[in-house]
Amino acid sequence: ENKKAVFKGEIATFDVFSIWGVKEGEDPKPLKRNIFIENANYTITIPADLKNDNNKVKVETNSPIQNQYDSLNTALDEIYKEVDMNQLQKDYLEGDETVKAQIMEKVQELGKKSEEVMNNFLGANPTSAIALFNAANEIRYLSADSARKIVDKFAEATEYAENRFYKAMTETLAKMEVVAVGKTAPDFTLNDPDGNPVTFSDL
């Protein structure tokens, strides 16, 4: 009503939702803003001049998780605030090998700074909701042993027992451990080029 929507409810453990928006008649690339939901109050304001800029969506809340997440993003944004990444991409596509090498060096430098900020945060907040959210998105790129250590760490935080990100991590780990180095490979049967079924364990 009057361009406002109200949502009410309670949750047992934190969750993450996203606000998406596309301004009609403009670049179809959508705006996305992650919101960490817990039992708190939120006022989310999207301006009329909607652009593909996450900072344009204002979130006012007494949620400790969301405020911590926004502080982290502010620190990361500071690294890139004086760099026009769209222009950098254009320059890379149009530049010669020397220009491309310079741009890649700059991007790698920014990436290292971002990684340092993130690692410092995770080191200071190893079992935070944000650390869990980050781990759930990154775990598939790890070895089974490294993934097991991360899952075990969050298993000790009982408040996450029913959290969907924690459950997703445990499911991913279970699949990784089935095919980990040193494990007996899962058996399967497929047809050969002549259409005859062949079972892997028979070979």
Image (cartoon, rainbow, N blue to C red):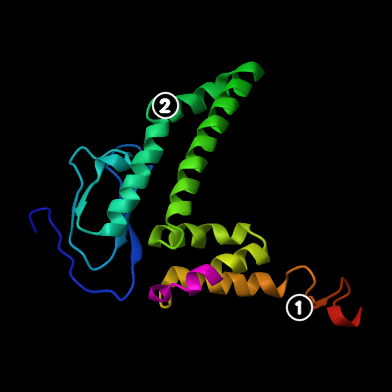
Residue 35 lies, in percent from the top left, at: 31, 56
Residue 84 is tagged as 2
Q: Residue at x 55, y 73 (%)?
A: 170
The residues colored magenta run 152-160
The reply to whether the magenta stretch includes residue 155 is yes
Residue 18 lies, in percent from the top left, at: 33, 56
Separation of marks 1 and 2 at Cα, in angstroms: 49 Å
Q: Pick the quarter of the image with the C terminus.
A: bottom right
The reply to whether the magenta stretch includes residue 144 is no
Closer to the camera in the image, 86 or 145: 145
Comes first in the chain, label 1 or label 2: 2
Residue 99 is tagged as none
In this rendering, is residue 126 above or below 24? Answer: below
Residue 186 is tagged as 1
Mark 1 Cα within 10 Å, few/some/many (few <14, many 20+)? few
Say whether residue 127 is left or right of residue 32.
right
Say whether residue 134 is left or right of residue 65.
right
Q: Residue at x 19, y 42 (%)?
A: 47
Q: Amino acid at mark 1?
A: Pro
Q: Is the residue under label 2 in contact with that under label 1 (CB below 8 Å)?
A: no
SS of the residue at dot 1? loop
Q: Amino acid at mark 2?
A: Asp
Residue 108 lies, in percent from the top left, at: 57, 32
Say which quarter of the image contains residue 180. bottom right
Can residue 197 be seen in this snapshot?
A: no
SS of the residue at dot 2? loop
Say which quarter of the image contains residue 200. bottom right
Q: Residue at x 37, y 30 (%)?
A: 81
Q: Pick the quarter of the image with the N terminus.
A: bottom left
In this rendering, is residue 104 above or below 128? Answer: above
